[in-house]
Amino acid sequence: MLKRKLDQQKANLDREETQKPALSGPEEAGTSSKLFCQPLWQQFYNIEVKLNEDLDGLTPPPDIACIYNPVQYASSLHCSYLRRYLDGPKKLVFIGMNPGPNGMGQTGIPFGNVRTVKVLMQLSGSVDKPPVEHPARPVDGLSFRKEEVSGVRLWDLFLRLSGNMETFARQCFVHNFCPLAFFSAKGNNLTPSELKGPYKKQIGTRCLEAFDQQLLLLKPMVIVAVGKYVLDLLKKSEYCQSVSVSVLGLPHPSPRSAKNTNWGETAQAFLEEHNLIRLMRNEA
């Protein structure tokens, strides 16, 4: 039933594609596969759909009571983000860990707290419910009232430095490594780094395989891993090993991270040190 629904959503999005302009003009040569003749954002999303199918086949450990996949239940809003802001290869890619319950868990957009998505990104779309919803972790989509601190910190800084989302998205893109959010029986948010046993390795392996495919589409010169978990996994990335690309690590903006009260200042200093603001401002 869920797969049939996703197939229908993809068909609807294909029909809408000709009605919604991208950020720039015609796609550059090589952006779309000659075999599939699809826009880059659609090829990117196809990889996500395949990853979701692979992850659905895994057996989680008993300490995980609920698993949310906002790429599935918020696919309309998620694809609006891809369609509008993934119109071609990107020189700089920021890669986060997984959906936060108050951000991407509500909107389907990486670090996407509701205010950022509605006001700064100017995106809208329907959001369904996950198959099993934990009572302590309700999903209300764009009606959700609680802010995602990580998303506020990250997007407010990025858009202040770049000027606006359109300028930022010319050469930059933000994505999450794992599409799943994990919750304990009490509703505690379990990050991928906190998973246990074979399941943790299985999640990491399958998400890395998918991300390597996505990197071949995006062709970034610089990849910034937001948090140590992703940075460690990227050491095994075939793309990062075989292509002349810089892989950097930025501390995660989550308030759960230790000594993180001045994240904005730390992150801006990092971006200045590595000369990345010029890409965010589309000046390179």
Image: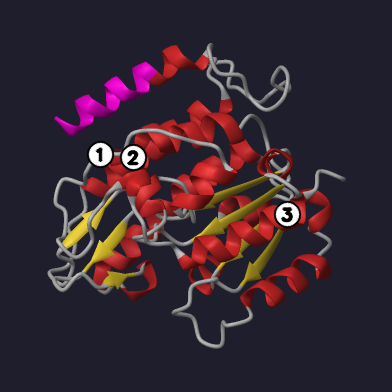
Q: Which mark is residue 245?
A: 3
Q: Tell me, yes or no, whether the two marked residues, 2 and 3, touch with CB atoms within 8 Å.
A: no
Q: Nearer the viewer, mark 1 or mark 3?
A: 1
The Cα atoms of the two marked residues, 2 and 3, are separated by 32 Å
Q: Is residue 81 above or below residue 206?
A: above
Q: Secondary structure at mark 2?
A: loop
Q: Nearer the viewer, mark 2 or mark 3?
A: 2
Q: Which mark is residue 74?
A: 2
Q: Which residue is mark 1?
A: 128
Q: Tell me, yes or no, whether the two marked residues, 2 and 1, touch with CB atoms within 8 Å.
A: yes
- For image coordinates 66% across by 43% down, the residue present is 165
Q: Which amino acid, by three-letter code, is at mark 2?
A: Ala
- For image coordinates 75% across by 49% down, the residue present is 163
Question: Which stretch did the figure color magenta?
Answer: 1-12
Q: Is residue 133 left or right of residue 151?
A: left
- For image coordinates 19% across by 65% down, the residue present is 136
Q: Which amino acid, by three-letter code, is at mark 1?
A: Asp
